Amino acid sequence: MTKKEFMNSVSKGQEDILQQMLDLLNMMKIDYCVIGGLAVNAYVEPVVSLDLDLIVFVDAIDPLLKAAQKIFNIERFSHSMNLVSTKSDLRIQLQTNLRYQTFISRSSIKEVMGYEMKVAVVEDVLQGKIWAYSDEQRRKSKRQKDLADIFRLVEAYPHLKDLLPEALKSEF
């Protein structure tokens, strides 16, 4: 079983939704980068995640959503858009918070679970995880996963400890 087949098996994919999204981004020549759990998997031993957290340039959001509505159901939230399909349990979350925009220019192509995708640099992935962990409105279980991802990154890249807020530095 390939990594892609594993990913589709775990997400109960009747179609390869992740590849469809990557193909759509490439076809439309939209610059993007992946953050979140799948991005963490680009830098450390992977764990299963059914979320693809994605950033595109703000000007590309509306054209992307227009094209994506042929494949996905779109749910709009204050700082994100969720793209879901009945053909997979994979959830694609398009982040619209402007603080992530600078991540795109520093990203590079990485292999993640058998897919070639643009991934934020490790420092930006860590920053995104710190922001997510610090959001007290997120479910506690999500925040605990963010904290575990922070630990995984800092254990693999000890220099990242210097980027942690003081409250988290004491954990190491």
Image (tube, rainbow, N blue to C red):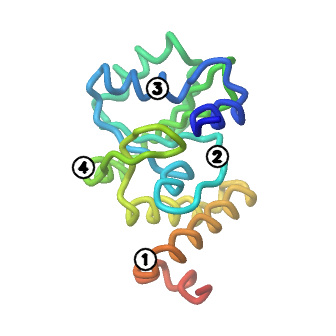
Neighbourhood count class around disc 4 (C-alpha, 10 Å): few under 14, some 14–19, many 20 upward: few
Would residue 86 be found to the left or right of residue 56 on screen?
Answer: right
> Which one is in front, 114 or 148?
114
Task: Identify the disc placed on residue 105.
Answer: 4
Residue 160 figure quarter: bottom left
Neighbourhood count class around disc 1 (C-alpha, 10 Å): few under 14, some 14–19, many 20 upward: some
First in sequence: mark 2 vs mark 1: 2
Q: CA distance from mark 3 to mark 2?
A: 16 Å
Would residue 101 be found to the left or right of residue 42 on screen?
Answer: left
First in sequence: mark 2 vs mark 4: 2
Q: Secondary structure at mark 1?
A: helix
Return the residue found at the far top.
Answer: 70
Residue 59 figure quarter: top left
Q: CA distance from mark 4 to mark 1?
A: 20 Å
Identity of the residue drawn at 52% across and 52% down: 36
Vertical placement of residue 82 versus 28, above or below: below
Q: Which residue is mark 1?
A: 160
Vertical placement of residue 71 versus 76, above or below: above
Picture coordinates of residue 152, whole percent (x, y): 58, 69
Q: Indicate which label's residue lies in the foreground, 3 or 4.
A: 3
Q: Which residue is mark 3?
A: 21
Label 2 sits on what residue type?
A: Ser
Identity of the residue drawn at 62% across and 85% down: 171
